[in-house]
Amino acid sequence: MALTPDSGETFLREVDENLRRDQLRETARKYGGWLIAAVILLLAATGGWLYWQDKQKNDAARDSEQLAVIFKDIAAGKLETIPQRLDALAKGGTDAVRASALFTRAAVAIEQNDRATAISRYHEVADDKGLPAPYRDLGLIRATSLEFDALKPEQVIARMQPMTKPGNPWFGSAGELTAMALLKQGKKLEAGRQFAAIAADRQVPDSIRARAVQIAGTLGVDATASLSSIAP
């Protein structure tokens, strides 16, 4: 019996649907395992990334809280376990927490007359390539200040050279160490000029600039013009 136009269209549609179903079944048979594996990997990667992000945030909050408790105990004079707790924090955590722990550990060591430990911790900061440059520079300045008498003047000058440029955030401290090293070499005029450069840099703290003006004067270099820009 001949098919009516409507029946023909229905028949063709059913054939088309069956073909599509067979194609999907065949595709699923051939590639289903790979597709499922890809979906699982994607979900695992996404979940792992979200977990890592959350863990990083939680770890940072925990380390910051521990550091705050340590500061509170230091203020209260409870120093018995402070060195160990700071050392533990210094082994991990965020850059800010790690650097703060190392600087604080060094300060506690100085308070306890343990210069060797303080120098070691400052060098840890200076040598930690994972920390921002300002942290590392400050660590090197602090270590050099404690080691100054044991270092040759040229060693001090070489260490401070990258920071003895006007505008550098540590120019005042690095410049003072450089000027003192120049004095050890007997180079009074060069030292005086270094102190005068410190006094002229308005980004240097006023206390350091005022001191630089006075010392420059004793070395025969007039830096009094810088006094007018120093807050009273």
Image (cartoon, rainbow, N blue to C red):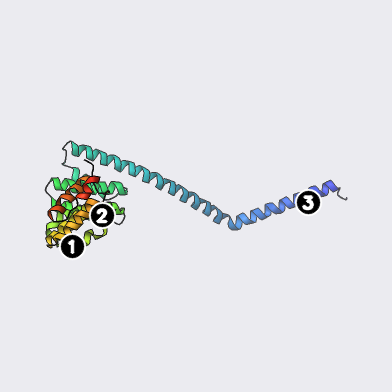
Between disc 3 and disc 2, the foreground one is 2
Q: Residue furthest top?
A: 76
Q: Secondary structure at mark 3?
A: helix
Q: Is residue 69 above or below residue 147?
A: above
Q: Which mark is residue 155?
A: 1
Query: Which amino acid, by three-letter code, is at mark 2?
Result: Asp
Query: What whole-number distance in Å separates the C-alpha atoms at marks 3 and 2?
Result: 79 Å
Inspect this view and state whether residue 15 appears.
yes
Q: Quadrant of the C terminus?
A: top left
Q: Which residue is drawn at the image coordinates 68% and 51% (left, top)?
A: 21
Q: Which mark is residue 137?
A: 2
Residue 201 position, x and y percent, is: 26, 51
Q: Are marks 2 and 1 in contact (CB under 8 Å)?
A: no
Q: Which residue is drawn at the image coordinates 19% and 37% (left, top)?
A: 75
Q: Which residue is mark 3?
A: 12
10 Å crowding of disc 1: few (<14), some (14-19), many (20+): some
Q: Are marks 3 and 1 in contact (CB under 8 Å)?
A: no
Quadrant hosting residue 192 = bottom left
Q: Residue furthest right?
A: 1
Query: Which amino acid, by three-letter code, is at mark 3?
Result: Leu
